[in-house]
Amino acid sequence: MDLTNIGDLVARQSYGRDVTFRVEALERNRAIIKGTEFRLLADAPVYDLVPVKGDALTGRAKEARIKAEQGLQRLHEERKSLEEQNRAMLGIERAVLPSDISAQSYFEVPGKVLHLDGDPLYLKKSMDLYEKLRVPAQGHYVNEKSMPDVLYRLLPSVRPDIVVITGHDGVLKNRVHNDLYSLSSYKNSRSFVEAIQVARQYERNFDSLTIVAGACQSHFEALLQAGANFASSPGRILIHALDPVYIAAKAAFTSVRGTIHITDVLKHTISGIQGVGGIETRGSYRIGLPKFQDLTQLNVVPSVM
């Protein structure tokens, strides 16, 4: 590639142009590049980069975009199914409910998400998706190494049902020992583990606080052993930037009466069983009665002076 500029979309020739990146920085003859679809931060020699025109995606990135759209569609379909189940349940219970309660009159309380992300661009994408899915979420851009301290401060004030701890990670090229069991072989897995431990000290019940943790190639086993409900990456593969969001959204809209089944989670992720895994966990979604009224239209007779 003759001319490379910050912000250009590129792919790596030596990797078969499998992933689309955006150039983040240039340092002499090397470029710092960030995956557009995958949570991957890498460096590459400038001569190895080839341009990607327009918004076109290459190889695995194109496939991931298609899977992401399919996953979003499934979530919307499940949301409609959940609404139908709620109406049907209230319809069945009509005999024991007051006559002015209809099957349409409930309100929803989905689980609340606290999302810490080590990448500002992926955080923005995540927050946009939470908004589309109507998941109440608070997001913070936090360097991975600072996540334990920030989480310690935020948990008591935010009081979330679901915590997402993600950003950048990866198996180090120049690790001393070729040992995937060691946390020292990973860029940020140790920080994720420490953040999970902080969250579990705050709430030990796995059904009261659902923790989704990890990024590309994270130490899956260590994250689960630290107390995560769901984590990446069993096969030490790249995960899609929005995989943690899909899992959190599934948890937020699964009833407290039901369990988030692992197979259902995998259906909503782009990376599949080699990218994410976890344990059975109760959902965080509740319904209530009656539905909130429009107070501007309510005719109320004052009762106090």
Image (cartoon, helix red, strand yellow):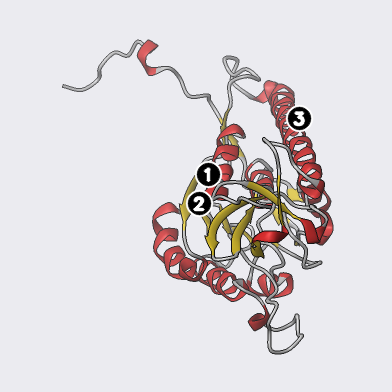
Write down the quadrant of residue 275 in the picture. bottom right
Q: Tell me the SS state at disc 3.
A: helix
**Front label number (3 vs 1):** 1
User: x and y percent of residue 195 in the render?
Assistant: 53, 69
Image point (45%, 69%), residue name: 146
State the image coordinates of residue 291 (x, y, percent, origin top left). 52, 24
Q: CA distance from mark 2 to mark 1?
A: 6 Å
At label 1, the amino acid type is: Lys
Mark 3 closeness class: few <14, some 14–19, many ≥20 residues within 10 Å: few
Which quadrant of the structure image shows residue 181?
A: bottom right
Q: Taking the image as drawn, is residue 275 in sight?
A: yes
Residue 77, numbered label: 3
Q: Quadrant of the C terminus?
A: top left
Image spot of residue 82 (x, y percent): 72, 32
Q: Earlier in the sequence, mark 3 or mark 1?
A: 3
Crowd tier of the residue under label 2, counting other residues whose Cα lies within 10 Å: few below 14, some 14–19, many 20 or above: some
Asked if 250 appears above or below 31 in the picture, the reply is above
- Residue named by callout 2: 120
The residue indicated by pointer 1 is 124
Front residue of 209/30: it is: 30
Q: Residue at x 69, y 62 (%)?
A: 216
